[in-house]
Amino acid sequence: MKRLNDTILKSHTLKLFLLAALLTLSACDTGPVKPEPGLIDEPGSVTEKQASLSEQAEKLLTLAEDSNSPVEQQKYRIQAARLHIEAGEIELAKKQLNILNENKTPNESDTAAILILSAEIAVAEKDYLLANELITEIKPITRDQQIDFYALKADLDYISGRYMFVVDRRVQLDTYIIDEKSKYRNDKKIWAALSSMSNAQLNSQQTSNLTIRSWLDLAKVMRSGQQNISQLENDMLDWGTRHPGHLVNQTFLNELITNYQKEALNIKQIAVLLPMQGDLSTISANIKNGLLSAFYNDTNSPVKPVINFYDTSNKETTFYQLYQQAINDGATNIIGPLDKVVISQLAQQNELDIPVLTLNYSENTLSHTENLFQFGLAPEDEARQVAELAIRQNKKSAAVFYPDSEWGNRLNNVFTEHYESLGGKVLTSANYATNTNDYRRPIRQLFNLDQSDIRHRKVEDTIGKKAQTISYRRQDIDMIFLAATHRSARSIMPAFKFHHAGDLPVYSTSHVYTGTVSRELDRDLNGLIFCDLPWVLQHDSPLNKVFTKNWPQQENFTRLFALGVDAYYLTYNLDYLKNKDYAFYDGQTGNIQLDNNNRITRKLLWAKFENGLPVYFEPVNNIQNNELTEN
């Protein structure tokens, strides 16, 4: 076995050498391009990177304070503000913006520079509406401002979900960018846009532009390689042959390939720590089935890892004892635990010996524990995505209807906070009891229908006789966010229509759909828009067919199965995802990215119930941002 593995590794190394040679030769006629010092993020924690950016910003602000030139002061403050934005220190960036506004002159170039910075801050906060308003006011003067302005349009397209617009703009922009470092950053943003697309979006794109075609082809190749490392090597060789004149920045391309490849060779033994008995055993069993299906489906890894399972349900054995036992047994990666309390304890450590991918999230969102990665099916992710889609579709005034439960309150709070941070306003909300199917009273409260009845009675008292009238709901809301399970939603949707709200779009999370087609039962959900897993909405993958065939009685747990599938493949992709804002993993639970706290966030797909069936669709954005034809 050792001799076989050595042979595989030698073959793998040779392929990497050939791949690097081919891509270097095909990149340009002037020979290989070496990375500039500091061009690629150095290894280290996010906090170190933020500290470095903050330090650079402070040096620039010192230069601004020491300068007697208003032009130089503005330049240094804008550069410092941009570093603060990159570090996630938005309030510090706003502080510099306020100073610039106080000191600005009537000069048109100064006005444009400050407006550009204002729009960059709005984009960083995902405030689509404000960013769009600011961009329409910008009249760039200098060449640098024109480049920044065009990049801003692309950034607005990105946060608006118009990913091919981003690719088109930034490919055009690349011809105007001179320095290597800026080209590298521009390529990262092209890649982020391509990586953000669903498979359906990516595969449906057609273009006559050879550069864009090479980017699209690269995205498809790298996406297939996320689950098939050996195939990636061969496919990348083919890609380099098909696109010998590609304009992808060589530094970025080398980084991309290296990050995909190096982690796979280090994964030799995966330890899975789950409660196999007790209340959580059913959840664990479905996650385990997903893991094993992915494992048996993985026939192309350079050296296939071993998987060992450890039962965490024995209360006499602590997680840390099992963790240490797994390491002593040779584990190179750990998947688990499921317990939020244990995960919260792990998040308080400085570092862990080997990568740990949890299957739930800690209570505290802040965590800088080295080698700790948190993954789960958080409903909060879905509530935020509902808020983002509603704003992108120009729905600025919302009503929220949610269950009177801990889960309902969480979704209400998360949706409201995120929706209002994006420029929307929740005008009314009401909760409903979870132990009844009678929703009349809270719905009447939600739509102010009781006030309509009071006005009706006042009219009758005034005229002294019965009056015919129709109750009118409040007219200042343009969407409803519904937090509900499928059972509740099947009664609530008809109740909305009965109470004169049938014309309002209703958005919800995956909880309104069982994951199994029930046409007769779900007819009452017609019109309801919701987000869900690719595994559920695009269920034609080989693994999904295996699940349906082998575990038909467990279809209600299909999302947990998908969680297990992604947990397995994520062990190969964590290094690629870590600390890279352009990196996504296209998984069964969504398009996956790591945030600054190594917590996995997921972009889901969208569906709408029609004739009792959930129909997948690509949302259309109604934000009137600038079109590509404008310069």
Image (tube, helix red, strand yellow):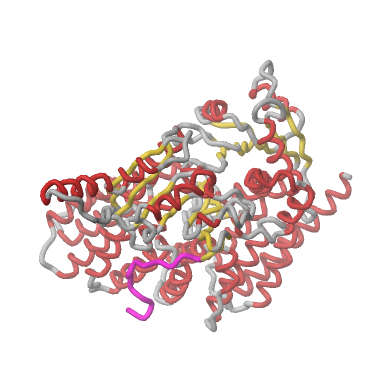
Q: Nearer the viewer, residue 169 or 519?
A: 519
In the rendered image, residue 275, in percent from the top left (x then y), is placed at 68, 29
Image spot of residue 207 (x, y percent): 54, 80
Looking at the image, which residue sits at the far front?
465
Task: Tell me where residue 489 appears, x and y as whole percent.
Answer: 49, 47
- Give me the residue at 77% from left, 57% from top: 12
Q: Residue at x 56, y 59 (%)?
A: 612
Residue 114 appears in the picture as rendered: yes
Give the quadrant of the C terminus. Answer: bottom left
Residue 358 placement: quadrant: top right
In the picture, measured across the screen, residue 202 lies left or right of residue 173, that is right
Residue placed furthest toward the top: 316
* 110 lies above or below 380: below
Magenta span: 618-631
Quadrant containing the N terminus in the rendered view: top right
* Residue 164 sits above or below residue 55 on the image: below
Residue 40, horizontal then vertical, whole percent: 50, 55
In this image, 106 relative to 74: left or right?
Answer: left
Identify the main secondary structure in magenta.
loop
Q: Is residue 252 visible?
A: no
Res 160 → quadrant: bottom left
